[in-house]
Each structure stands twice: as C-alpha cells, then as structure tokens.
Image (cartoon, rainbow, N blue to C red):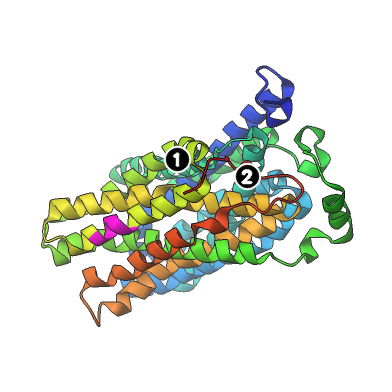
Amino acid sequence: MSESTGSTTGSPLSRRLRTARGCTFVAFALNGFVMGMWIVHIPAIEHQVGITHAVLGWLLLFLGGGAFAGMQVCGALVDRFGSRTIVLAGGALCSATVVLPGLADSPWTLAAALLALGFGNGCLDVSMNTQAVQVERGYGRPVMSAFHAVYSVGGVLASLIGARTISWDWRPSVTLAAVAVAGVLVTLALVPGMLPPESSSPAAEGPRTADSTASAAKVPPARRRTPSQVWALGALALMLMLCEGVANDWSVLHLKDVLDAPAATAALAYGGFSTAMTVGRFVTDRVVARFGRVSVVRYGAGLAALGLAVASLSPWAPLALLGWTVFGIGLSGCIPQFFTAAGNMDPESSGANVSKVAGLGYIGMLAGPAVIGPLTHLVPLNITFFLPVAFCVAAAFAAGILRPVRRGKAAPEPAPAEA
C-alpha cells in the first residue's frame, strides 16, 4: 500500500495519521462523557428546578432543537474552516455549557441551558464525525465504527463517575463545573493533533480528476446542491436511529410492563442492548473491510429486525433479553456507515453532507419515544415495535445506496463481492 494511505511504517504521514486517530478517539469519548454526565444528573436537576417528568419531556426538545441547529450551522463551517477548527469550538462549547443545567433554577433557565448545550453538542458531533471521515480516508480502510464505540465508552465512564460523585452528595453544579473545566482543557490539548483541512494539507491530498478540479473551482461547497444520495442516507439514518431510540426508551418498560419482569431483570434489556452496540462497533470495522459496507448494513439491519421481532413476540423474559441483545448487535455497525458514505461522497462538501445525515438521524432518535408513545393507545406496547422492525427491513433492502459514487477522491470502500 502506498504512503498516501498512511500505512508506511514510521513515515511522518503514518505518525500523523495515528496521532489524529488517537485525538479523534478522545473527541468521541469526550462527547459521550460530557453528555453522559448531563444524563446521570437529570433526576437531581429535575428536583432542583421543581418540574414534573412531563415538563422535563418538553424541555428536552430544546436540547434536541439546539443539537439539530448546531449540526446544520457547523456543517457549512466545517467545509469552510476545516473540521479541526470546529472541533475546537464545538468541544469547548459543549464542555463549557454542560454546567448551565446544573445552575438552572427555573424551567425557562433550564430551557436556555439545554438549548446552549444542545448547540454545542451538535457542533462537536458534526465536526468530530467529519474529522473521523478524513482520518479514515487517510488510512484507506474502515476505522469509523470504533470511534462510535468509544463514544459509548465515554458514556459508561460518565455513569461510573457520576454515580460516585452523587454518592458523595456533590451538587450537580459542582460536578458539572468540574466536567466543564476538564472538557475545555482536554479539547485544547487534543485539537493540535488532528488533521488540517485537506485542501491545505499536501499529505492529505489524493488524486483529482480534471473534471472534479474544475467542478470544485466553479462551485463553492456552500452553494452546491445536496446530492439525492445524501438525503437517502439521511432517511436511512433517521429510520435506524429511531430504532435505537426505541431501545433506549422502551426496552426496560417492555420487560417490566408487558412481561411482568422484576425491575432488576427489566434493566438488563437496555444493558444487553447497549453492551451489544458497543462491542459490535469495536468489531465492525474488520467486518466492513472483509465484506463491505453494503453487506454490513443489509445483514445487520436484517439481524436487528429479527432480534426485535423475537423480543416483541416472546412470552418469556430471557428470550426477550436475547432478542434485545441481538437487536443491538444488528444495529451496531449500521449508523457509522452512513456517516462515512456521506463524508466521502464529495470531500469538498464533507461537513455539509455529514451534517444533513447526522441531523436527520438525530430527528429519528428523538422521534422514537414520540412515535411509540401514542401508538400504545391503539395497540399493546410490544406490537408497536413492529414499526421499527419494518424500518430495519426497509434499510436492509435499501442498503445498496451505500455503494460509493466515484468522483474525485474515492471513498475507502472495500471491494468484496457484495451480496
């Protein structure tokens, strides 16, 4: 393999890519950790502000709305200034604003705090995923899924540290202030090791065709039409992230309310799902390299559909737990492939394309509880799960959209015979 892929042992480019990959891992872990620390303090902040669960549900829309806005704003900024610069801004903003919910004393101040935190989270999400696409392009082989796995590890670390500080009776404002300071310092330390914008980095430049160079010169990235394939990827991300949201919000209630499982047993449903998601993402990159992205999404979504169908129809809690775990294994490798495909479709508009896929996917994540809840007034909870089952089946059939459109720099797509 040539040096341009970063695989020449000991070369400056190889060292730079390894450093950038390590720094990107830290960015993903930081994002998962910061958002995880907010999540573990939700009950304390809810009590501090004096609001009900219903009011909290409405206020969380400000978090989602801020994240969506941050993704769309920063997508264009990434293409203009480079993902490294926006990771600096997004990481600092996401870290600094996590303290604001801990200082809130009314529903309105909490709404403003969540809007700011969501915006910072959206900025960091798009910029770190775009940097991950650039790192993967340099490696010339799949590395994206491991980044998403590390995000989950950051959330697990937050749950452990948060549980400890809560047991020490630390106020949320104190803990989150410490997280904010640490997060800003970590961001300042990791950003210099990331890759600069490709247009200004000879090491990162790949071969360009005459047509692609002329096209880039004629059409500024911010003014290009979004390819229909990007919207298709976004639609698939929306469907499968809605499925993930369903597991996050309803898996425990399914075992508890439908199967009458004890609370401790019911909690294992989400534990099995999230563990399977994390482990699956650590191994997905090797599977992608062997079988290709299309096969990973096709068979992964199909396996997810099977797992959720088993969980939905099972009359026994152990079998339902197995179904939720299989559901997580199937979904684990799918979403990272959409980010990679969008980021590699047109490297000059990588940030904008990733922001659209991420934004639609985030809408799907938020829509999970909003869609399933009303359906439970019409049919039993376990039957509502056949909506996400249908989405998984649709994603499996539509997986061919992941095949790259070759233009300019090619995506690092393995070339096995796709099923």
Residue at 67% from the left image edge and 35% from the top image edge: 138
Residue at 25% from the left image edge and 61% from the top image edge: 309
Within-10-Å neighbours for mark 2: few <14, some 14–19, many 20+:
many
Give coordinates of residue 210: x percent, y percent: 87, 48
**Separation of marks 2 and 1 at Cα, in angstroms:** 15 Å
Residue 377: mark in rendering:
none
Give the vertical position of 69 relative to 407 (above or below): below
Residue at 63% from the left image edge and 51% from the top image edge: 404
State yes or no: discs 2 and 1 in contact (Cβ < 8 Å): no
Give the vertical position of 143 relative to 122 (above or below): above
Q: Amino acid at mark 1?
A: Thr
In the rendered image, which residue does mark 2 sit on? Answer: 133
Give coordinates of residue 112: x percent, y percent: 54, 68
Q: Is 208 inside the magenta-drawn segment? A: no
Residue 284: mark in rendering:
1
Within-10-Å neighbours for mark 1: few <14, some 14–19, many 20+:
many
Question: Which residue is farthest bottom?
Answer: 378
Which residue is at the front of the view, 32 or 417? 417
Give coordinates of residue 93: x percent, y percent: 61, 52
Q: Picture quarter containing residue 372?
A: bottom left
Q: Is residue 8 visible?
A: yes
The residues colored magenta run 305-309
Q: Main secondary structure of the magenta part?
A: helix
**Mark toward the start of the polypeptide (2 vs 1):** 2
- How many numbered marks does the figure carry? 2
Q: Amino acid at mark 2?
A: Val
Label 2: state its secondary structure. helix
Q: Picture quarter containing residue 119?
A: bottom right
Q: Is residue 205 left or right of residue 22?
A: right
Q: Is residue 105 visible?
A: no
Label 1: state its secondary structure. helix
